Amino acid sequence: MRRTAAVASIMFALGFLGVRLARPPAPVEESAPPVREAPHAAVPAIAAAPAEDASPKTPEDLRARIEELLAAVPPAVSGTGIIAGRVTTRSGEPLPGARIHAEPAGEDGRGEGDVPTAAVLDLIARHGRSREATADAEGAFTLAGLEACIYEVSAELPGYEVHSIGGHASVSAKSGDTIQLIGRRLAEVPVVLVLPDGTMPADGRIACLDEAGKTWRPPRTSLFLPRGDYDLKGSASHEGGRYESAVRSISIAEGRDVPEVGLALEHKLAIRGLVRVSDAWLGVRLRVSVREPGEDEDSESGHVDDGGGFEFTGLDPGTYLVRASRFEGHTAVERVVELAGKDAAIELVLPPLSPDDYTVLRVLAPDGTPLSRYSYELAWPGDTAHRKDGTCWLFPTRAAQEQHLSMSVRVRAPGYGDRRVSFGRDVREVVVRFAEPAALEVTWSALDPRLARRDVVDLHFSVELVELETRQKHDARARAAAGRLRVFGLPPGMYTAAIEAQCGFSTRMCSTEIDLRSGENRFDVPLGGVSTLTVVVDPALRGKDLAIRSLGIDPPISGSSEIGDDGVAVLPLLPPGEYRLAVHGSSSEGDMRVMLPGPADVRFEPRPAGGLLVLDVEGIEEAGLRNGDRIVAVEGAAVTSAPALRAAVLSARSRRTVKIAVVRGEARVELDVDPDAIADESHRFWPVSLPTR
């Protein structure tokens, strides 16, 4: 009954929101120019609006109300699974009282600021499947009543930032898993906002650079922050005026609270206005800026809104120069504004453009018809405006017009390539006409008959073409049985072509340069020298994947092929070299060495693993491992599988480093490795037998 009532309340709130958001906006007085919120140069100061009523008026309000209603409804127990774990500091001290939350992994269908009906129903369903628990005196917790799915587990504890061992906000886990969460103590930073008369505002806002802001309430509000340096800024609305503080810098040491931080608010003023133009260019790249007279640079600048309105806030009393322009200084107008005690409202009128201010760019297809889809890049300082008729107006800066006798522009159109055109500074129209595009047909000779007999229907060929001049990429893909693939609409010119065969893994067939001319082009893929390997596996392993990894081949070949019901797996189109075969997850970890060219049919007879081969250290270089290392022991205990390595590393998480022994070349090397660096990197290691060469 409680759940039914909550759902009914939620759907009522959703309908109410639709009514509220559908109401037309209140009319704007003609005497007040339209304005747009302009950010302050340092930190956006957002004043908290006084509460009118508690009903939801925005999607964010509705979402908060939905979550409030759901919080009163206990989730129904529908599963029997359990996830257990502990919440501790990095040194192992328990963190009792931490609140642990588990929610089924996956997208919830909500967009930013959007709560459609389907997402509301999804939110209700996810709440019914979510679970919560509280850590006991030892930091231990148990999440019960779980279904057979993946959960995202996170935790909260006032004054702490709780994350996974790897530093992530949550941990992915399923029933039966035991997880570890690490809490990092945050420093408390109490903040007080004070008005010029010594009183406090009714409410305000604290902005912390590089961190999310927070609403301020008297007499003080605390921020909880990790170690580091921060810049704080306060703001508030009071008696119709806007108040802001100067930026206050603080430093936080690990685990130490900060004395109370007082932010003195000062009254700030605003300049609001309207830019009018006498032609049809209103709202198209109009710029407005403000600076103090005598200064060389603007203190603030921005674009006007579609109605020509602008606003500069957070200004001190004084004299300001407001300047409006369009297209890098063309047809600019200025106004001196005095700010003293109250905001100012002004109007700026721009004269019409002159034909001498710009050059018209026209882009044509090979048959002379105008193209509207193209991009352009100027080789000189300036601005551009794309017109509805497909032309582009180019506006060089005044300085560029004075310094350059000629200009150039690079134009690119899909399917036609790009062209660079130079023209004199007095030229008022430039026409770019593209040539006919090229098409490429890639073919390959007959494939090994065993591929058809084994019905390897997922075998594909793909081509990636990269233009040498622009580095633009084009690609296409087709089934191998088709015997060919085609790529259309290519700009004529020189390309690098990389052709691969793909079937559970990718094999680079060739990489070459091709000169494509307008019209039809053809390239035949050389298949000489490649081998198709048939591997006979124990039928008890049918349905599993036979993994393959090349050694010493660039680019490396890595992937798998499913073992059929007859215990056979086919690995097609392999270039010469050394390969390792393995069935991960079988009863015994190990691999088999295969050299190609060699026998076309082999029986899978793995040898016991003698360690873990390091395949790729990119991104974990700080661990000290190198590609080709063979991990043989952790803290003196032998390891021969990725799960064993992870378990050994996690058991040493309370220490800053774990000792790992590797064989590098012919030598044994001892490394001190941060456990977090490799705990979740199992995909980088391969259980390998000897020899590795």
Image (spheres, rainbow, N blue to C red):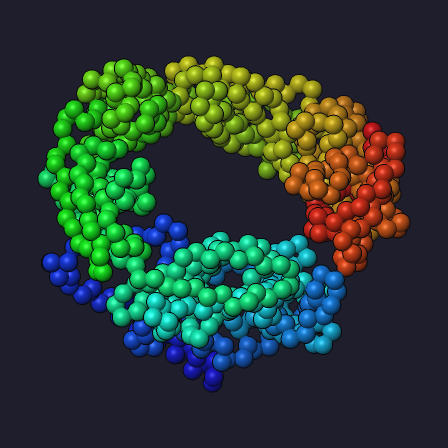
300 vs 304, nearest the viewer: 300
208 vs 307, nearest the viewer: 208
Look at the image and tell me whether residue 35 can be seen: no
Look at the image and tell me whether residue 148 can be seen: yes
Q: How many marks?
A: 0
Q: Position of residue 322 (x, y in %)?
A: 22, 44
Q: Is residue 656 left or right of residue 505?
A: right
Q: Is residue 287 left or right of residue 4?
A: left
At horizontal 63% and vertical 64% (from top left) the residue drawn is 256
Q: Residue placed farthest to the bottom in the image?
A: 1
Q: Position of residue 235 (x, y in %)?
A: 37, 63
The image quadrant where one finds the C terminus is top right
378 to 34, vertically: above or below: above
69 to 311, vertically: above or below: below
582 to 693, vertically: above or below: below
Q: Position of residue 512 (x, y in %)?
A: 56, 18
* Occupied quadrant, residue 595: top right
At horizontal 49% and vertical 65% (from top left) the residue drawn is 261
Q: Position of residue 143 (x, y in %)?
A: 65, 72
* Occupied quadrant, residue 79: bottom right
481 vs 43, nearest the viewer: 43
670 to 354, vertically: above or below: below
At horizontal 37% and vertical 71% (from top left) the residue drawn is 198
* Occupied quadrant, residue 54: bottom left
